[in-house]
Image (cartoon, rainbow, N blue to C red):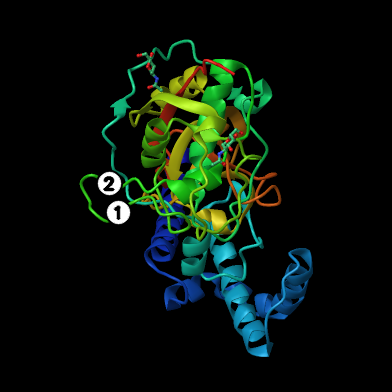
């Protein structure tokens, strides 16, 4: 009886929530609907924005060329505070707030810190075989097994795809050889110009974006990747290719694309090592920590990252009791997110996390020298 009495009220709550979420999701920054959603806190925000901005400038050691730039960045910062608030409402199991990206507009953020091109499959990508899933561990983390290098930083260069690729090959190489070797993103940035066979002109192009599957194709054809220390990251794509074949540290034997099934993704992760995945990064600009599980998130993939594990019950908001999550290594330095990592809920293809997954097998090097 009690529950049927409650239901009209919960319907109303559900409806207002859906309306607010839909309005927020359908709109971009500065939309009047959004201002209404956050209206009660607007004054409070204005009062504190200056204080927050000061803290932001000193925390992230930011400085601007002149007064005009400073004023412009402050206005962008304020709009990002509102966005972080909106993200917090849409994504209550994570913490959103001020990050090192809080003075960038969403399009600056996309251009400078993401860099994933449209999905296409190079000739040598296979469909991963279907694996058994009945004996999967409830929790798994390749970091505990020594297959993951430290968090790296792509800087303001849309080279995420190269970090996702090296991460996957570092893991596969570890599984094949027992040694964890940090591999060169700069080699991919400088030397990999593999193009989409179906879309002429859509090629891996340094800081302007690329694709992990194309990068694996390049690595397969080139013979492998050099060590990070032998070909260090510069964060620019204006240098010539300095690849030296005699210094290859890890090679790709084969690679495959994993099906859209999350159990298959988990099974491939456990069997083959960390996976290169694409994700929609819109909530990552304001992410501070926790398990991100937004009510609505686009499935358009714009960021390449590395899936390294999963947890079983890390968060318990009211709507998803104790639900599992994926553990994702990002390439924005250790100061971003949870020591450079991102957690996102598992099981609903949130932010497209299940839609573009590639796995790689490393060749065991026959060491001649
Ligand atoms: C490539 O590396 C080898 C081995 O370290 C070295 O002897 C050779 O000079 C290098 N080649 C170039 C072009 O740098
Ligand atoms: C690579 O090939 C081997 C042998 O055919 C296969 O067992 C393995 O699953 C493949 N790995 C990937 C990542 O495609």
Residue lying at the far bottom in this picture: please name it. Answer: 68
> Where is ligand 1, by quadrant?
top right
* Front-most of residues 15 and 369: 369
Does residue 88 show up? yes
At 55% across and 75% down in the image, what residue appears?
39
* Front-most of residues 282 and 242: 242
Does residue 274 show up? no
For label 2, the SS is loop
Tell me the number on the disc at residue 196. 2
Q: Position of residue 80 (x, y in %)?
A: 58, 69
Does residue 76 lie above or below 323 as drawn?
below
In which quadrant of the rendered view does residue 223 lie? Answer: top left
In which quadrant of the rendered view does residue 211 lie? Answer: top left
The residue to which callout 1 is attached is 202
Q: How many marks?
A: 2
For label 1, the SS is loop
At 58% across and 40% down in the image, what residue appears?
329
Mark 1–mark 2 contact, CB under 8 Å?
Answer: yes
At 66% across and 63% down in the image, what residue appears?
98
Quadrant position of the C terminus in the picture: top right
Label 2 CB less than 8 angstroms from ligand 2? no
Q: Position of residue 242 (x, y in %)?
A: 52, 46
At 65% across and 42% down in the image, what residue appears?
151
In the rendered structure, which disc, 1 or 2, sits on the residue that comes first in sequence?
Answer: 2
Q: Position of residue 87 (x, y in %)?
A: 54, 59
């Amino acid at each position: 009886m009690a529950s049927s009495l409650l239901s009209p009220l919960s319907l109303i709550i559900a409806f207002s929530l859906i309306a607010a979420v839909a309005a927020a999701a359908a709109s971009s920054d500065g939309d009047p609907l959004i201002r209404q959603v956050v209206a009660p806190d607007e004054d409070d925000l204005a009062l504190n924005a200056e204080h927050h901005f000061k803290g932001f400038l000193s925390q992230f050691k930011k400085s601007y060329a002149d007064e005009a730039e400073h004023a412009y960045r402050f206005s962008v910062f304020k709009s990002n505070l509102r966005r972080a608030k909106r993200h917090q409402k849409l994504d209550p199991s994570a913490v959103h707030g001020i990050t090192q990206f809080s003075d960038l507009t969403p399009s600056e953020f996309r251009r400078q810190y993401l860099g994933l091109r449209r999905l296409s499959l190079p000739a040598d990508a296979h469909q991963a075989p279907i694996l058994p899933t009945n004996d999967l561990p409830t929790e798994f983390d390749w970091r505990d097994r020594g297959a993951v290098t430290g968090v790296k930083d792509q800087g303001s260069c849309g080279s995420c795809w190269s970090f996702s690729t090296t991460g996957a090959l570092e893991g596969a190489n570890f599984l094949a050889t027992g040694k964890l070797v940090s591999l060169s993103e700069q080699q991919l940035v400088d030397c990999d110009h593999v193009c989409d066979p179906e879309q002429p002109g859509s090629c891996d192009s340094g800081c302007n974006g690329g694709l992990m599957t194309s990068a694996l194709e390049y690595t397969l054809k080139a013979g492998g990747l050099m060590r990070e220390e032998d070909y260090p990251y510069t964060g620019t794509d204006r240098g010539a290719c300095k690849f030296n074949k005699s210094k290859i540290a890890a090679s790709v034997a084969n690679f495959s694309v994993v099906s859209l099934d999350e159990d298959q993704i988990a099974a491939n992760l456990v069997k083959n090592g960390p996976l290169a995945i694409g994700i929609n990064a819109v909530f990552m600009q304001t992410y501070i920590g926790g398990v991100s599980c937004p009510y609505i998130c686009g499935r358009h993939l714009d960021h390449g990252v590395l899936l390294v594990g999963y947890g079983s019950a890390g968060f318990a908001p009211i709507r998803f009791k104790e639900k599992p999550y994926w553990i994702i290594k990002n390439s924005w330095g250790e100061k971003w997110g949870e020591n450079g990592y991102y957690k996102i809920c598992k099981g609903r293809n949130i932010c497209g996390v299940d839609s573009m997954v590639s796995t790689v097998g490393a060749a065991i090097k026959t060491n001649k020298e």
